Each structure stands twice: as C-alpha cells, then as structure tokens.
Amino acid sequence: MGEFFQTYFDFSIMGDNFNAVLEGFWWTIKLSLIGGAFALAWGLILSVIRQLPGKALAPVRWLAIAYIDCLRGIPMLLTLLLIYGGLGTLQSTGTIPEWLGIPEFFGWPSSFWYGVMALTLTYGAYMAEVYRAGIESIPRGQMEAARSLGMSHGQAMRFVIVPQAIRRVIPPLLNDYIALMKDTSLVSVISLAEVVHVGQDVYSTTFNPSALTLGAIMFLIVTLPLARLVDWQIKRQDEKFQRGLA
Amino acid sequence: MSDETVSLSEDVARGETILKVSNLKKSYGKLEVLRDIDLDIKKGEVICVLGPSGSGKSTMLRCLNLLESPTGGTIELKGDIVFDGTKPKNLDDLRRETGMVFQSFNLFPNMSAKENVSIAQVRVRGRKKADADKRSIEQLTKVGLAEKVDEYPDRLSGGQQQRVAIARALAMDPEVMLFDEVTSALDPELVKGVLDVMRELADSGMTMICVTHEIGFAKEVADRVIFMDGGYIVEQGPPKDVLDAPREERTKKFLGLVLDH
Ligand SMILES: Nc1ncnc2c1ncn2[C@@H]1O[C@H](COP(=O)(O)OP(=O)(O)OP(=O)(O)O)[C@@H](O)[C@H]1O
Ligand SMILES: [Mg+2]
C-alpha cells in the first residue's frame, strides 16, 4: 500500500511540478473551450445542411452525410496527424496561405491550432448527429400544427421545433463536450505542452508518474461536476415526460 | 360529379361554395388511400365524416389543407385553384382560410395557453403582440378557459388542451374548420365539454368538416353526413337519411357495428 502511494502520490514531485502541470492544464482548458465552441457551431451548420429540403439539394445533403459518417469513423488521433503532417508542407509549396498552413493566432503555437482544427472537424460531426436527433425527437404533430396555422417550414422550425429541441440536446451535447475535453490530451503527440505532455515530461526525468496523477485530478475537478450536471438535466427532463409533457 | 341531390337547409344550399374538391386521389407508393373524391363544401355547412379505420378519413382531411400532397385531382378555394393536380398554389391563402384540430391536440408544450393561441396570430397574421394576446384571451374565454390562459399544456386536462387547440385555430379567423376525431383521445367525461364547443361553433355559422365516431353529435349537428370506405365516398346525405335509413350495405354494416357498442 505504501509502495503504491509512493508511486502515484509522491507529494514532493507533485508540489515541485504543480505550476508546470497547471500551466499545461490551462492549455487543455483553452483547447476545449475554443475547439468546443467551433465544434458546436460547425455541428449546427452540418446538421442544417443535412436537413435542407428539396430534390435539387440532394447532393449537398449527401456530402454532409458522407462527411459526418467518415469523420466519426476515423480516430481523432489520425485526423490530427493528417492535419499536422500535411498543412505545413502544403504551405511551404504555396498551395495554401500561411495563416492556414502554420496558424499562430494570438501568438499561440500552431500545434494548438492544429488541435483546434482536429477537435472541430471530428466533434462537429458528432454534434451534428446530436442536433439532428434532437430535432427528430420532436413529435411530427408539432410541425403539422404549426404548418396548419399557416407558418412556413422555416417559421415552424424557428418558433416551435428548435426551442423544444434545444432542451433535449443539452445533455447529449454536454456528454460530447466531456469526451472532447478528454480528447484534447491527444494533442500532446504533436508536442503541445498541455497537461498530459507536461506530466509525461516529468515522468521521463523522475521515473515517477505522480505529475500525471495530478493532471488526472485536475481533469476530474472539471469533468465530474459536468457529469453530474448531465445527470441532473436528464432527470429533470424525465420528470417532465412523466407529467405528460412533450 | 357524383353530387347526389342533397336537401340541405335552405340558406346553406344557396350559399357560396368554399371548397370544391374534384377527383381527389392519394397514394402512398402502391397503396391507394383516396381513389376518387368529389366534394363541394358550402359556406356554413357542417359535414360529419364517418367510416371504418383506414378508410382514408384523416388523409382526406389532411389533403384539404395540403398537409398531405394529393397525387391527383384539384382543389379550389372560393373559386381559386389551390391544388392543380400536381402541386400547391396559393398555399398561404389556403392555410390561412383553414383551421385544423387534431386527435392528439398538438399544443406547443413550451408555451402557455395564451401563447399557443397568440404565436401564429403574430407570426402569420402580423398582429401586434398586445392585440393578439387580447384576442387569445377572448377566444379562450369563449371555450370556457378564462381561468387557464397562463397555464402550460402539461397542467391542463385533455379536454382543456383540446379546447385550447380549437381556440388556437379559431383565433386565425379561418373560413373552414377541420376536425379529425378530436374527442377520440379523451376520457368519456371530458368529451361533452369539447362537443359543446363544437356545437356552439356550428350554431354560429362556421363551416366545419368533422371526422368523428360520435353518431349522436352527427345526428344533431350535421347538415350532411359522409360515409367513407376504401378511399371512396360510399354514401352521403342528411343525417336522417344516412344514419337512420342508409341505402348502402357497407354503411348499414358499419352503423350496426358502431351502434352495437
Ligand atoms: N404517411 C403514410 N404512409 C403510408 N401509409 C399511410 C400514411 N398515412 C396513412 N396511411 C395509410 O392510409 C390508409 C388510410 O389512413 P387514414 O389515416 O386516412 O385512415 P382513417 O380513415 O383516418 O382511419 P382511422 O379511423 O383509424 O383514423 C391507412 O391504410 C394507412 O395505413
Ligand atoms: Mg384518422
């Protein structure tokens, strides 16, 4: 037991490296906030494209579906490595502009922005499915009632369907957000000094994983309350269902 | 036209035709649900539609306001074509002139009774919010829900919800009201309140088409009863003919079944 504790909870190592780990975790937070915001927006755009009406737009819908299926079928680590391995090269040959090839907005390293791109591309696909499921979970009668009152398809979506769907997509979106947050750790492989990367550095000099334990604790401080929040939201909605609403 | 000589009450018979349906057809894939429907609906007329399950009653009603797109035939609204056999025309006019009430109420659960009645007045009719709300309260009072204007649907009984739904449709000042088995989902003790509202509406001169299994209501309120089976109108006429002395075997059989219960 003592051995176990010494290995994983070496307080002197944790104390010595606390600031470095915290700084790494700050990158984790920034990645999940910015990547998360872009993924939310991109997912919404994809789900709207996927549901565009009419025969003429079928190819566009088909493209959106193909995109969503593919990105959900590839490990995010691969997407990240493809971005990292390709954009720099494409920039150096002049195929794409520098701001895209080696993005360094706000003076943050390009590995950070590659991470944001991978998170957006991958989690946008997941979130598009969440939005779609939310809209499809609204009973057909709601759209029919709105249309029979003279509303257009767009008005019915905007005033009737989407306001109801939003409540239902919040829990699954939060779930995806927790997953996204954990997947930010993958960006360590392209040398962004986020929390896992810092912990790993400490390990390679001390041969003790306590700094990684510290990183895990920091993750839990954020993800555990989020998980509770999801549960609470779901419960609240179940109660509404039992009262016969929606 | 398969129009039988129907002895409607005098004023109705002379009235203008509001909806004229000719050769209406509807198929889902190979399944022909409406085969050939001809129907003239006069201003102020109350029509009750009866028929066995699956005979196409709901489908016909939903074709009338083009919630469902027919596969053939034409629909005219006060002389203007709204469906020309292939696609809708003047759809906005049609939807504005027809109100619909559903078996499952379909109130918007995230809005109070008043908001349910106001939203389309504001967004479709372009009324000011205050005017719409005033109208909503009037309309809700008329259906006996003056005390419930700020309640949300989940706090209303089925009968109350259905009366909100009727108020919501009426607040748009439609020319015709379509009712699809609006009491079928209600507990027996709540049916009367909704039928009373419909009876009053009929007395006020509203043009109504009601799909219903309430034979008593049809007898009392209808100017014309239509019996449907297999996608056709099998028999139609005044309630005393169709309900008390049906000519067609299928009508007799159906009424026998319904009245046995
Ligand atoms: N969207 C649809 N797709 C395929 N078939 C449908 C669809 N809607 C209705 N039908 C079929 O059309 C037929 C007529 O349905 P409809 O709802 O009009 O019957 P109804 O007379 O209203 O019956 P009920 O008394 O049970 O309400 C049924 O066989 C039904 O299965
Ligand atoms: Mg029906």
Image: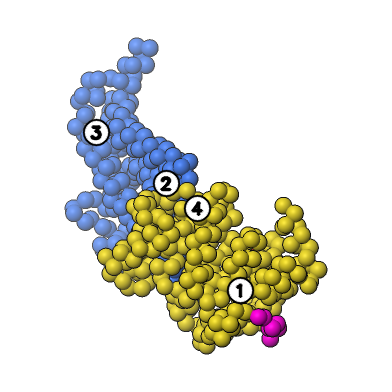
Chain under callout 4: B
Q: Which residue is mark 4?
A: B159
Crowd rating for badge 3 (residues with CA inside 10 Å; few <14, some 14–19, many 20+): many
Chain under callout 1: B
Q: Secondary structure at mark 1?
A: loop
Q: Residue A21 bears which disc, if any?
A: 3
Q: Which chain is blue?
A: A
Q: Residue at x 56, y 81 (%)?
A: B12
Q: Residue B116 bears which disc, if any?
A: none
Q: Secondary structure at mark 4?
A: helix
Q: Which chain is yellow?
A: B
Furthest-bottom residue in this view = B79
Mark 1 vs 4, N-terminal side: 4
Chain under callout 2: B
Furthest-top residue in this view = A2
Instruction: Pick whichever, B21 or B212, lies toward us.
Output: B212
Q: Are marks 1 and 4 in contact (CB under 8 Å)?
A: no
Mark 1 vs 2, N-terminal side: 2
Whole-percent x, y for residue B252 in the image: 78, 65
Q: CA distance from mark 1 to mark 3?
A: 82 Å
For label 4, being within 8 Å of ligand 2 is answered no
Crowd rating for badge 2 (residues with CA inside 10 Å; few <14, some 14–19, many 20+): some
Q: Residue B155 bears which disc, if any?
A: 2
Q: Which residue is mark 1?
A: B223
Crowd rating for badge 1 (residues with CA inside 10 Å; few <14, some 14–19, many 20+): many
Whole-percent x, y for residue B174 in the image: 45, 73
- In the rendered structure, which amino acid carries the disc numbered 2? Arg
Numbered range of the magenta stretch: B1-7
For label 1, being within 8 Å of ligand 1 is answered no
Q: Residue at x 77, y 59 (%)?
A: B256
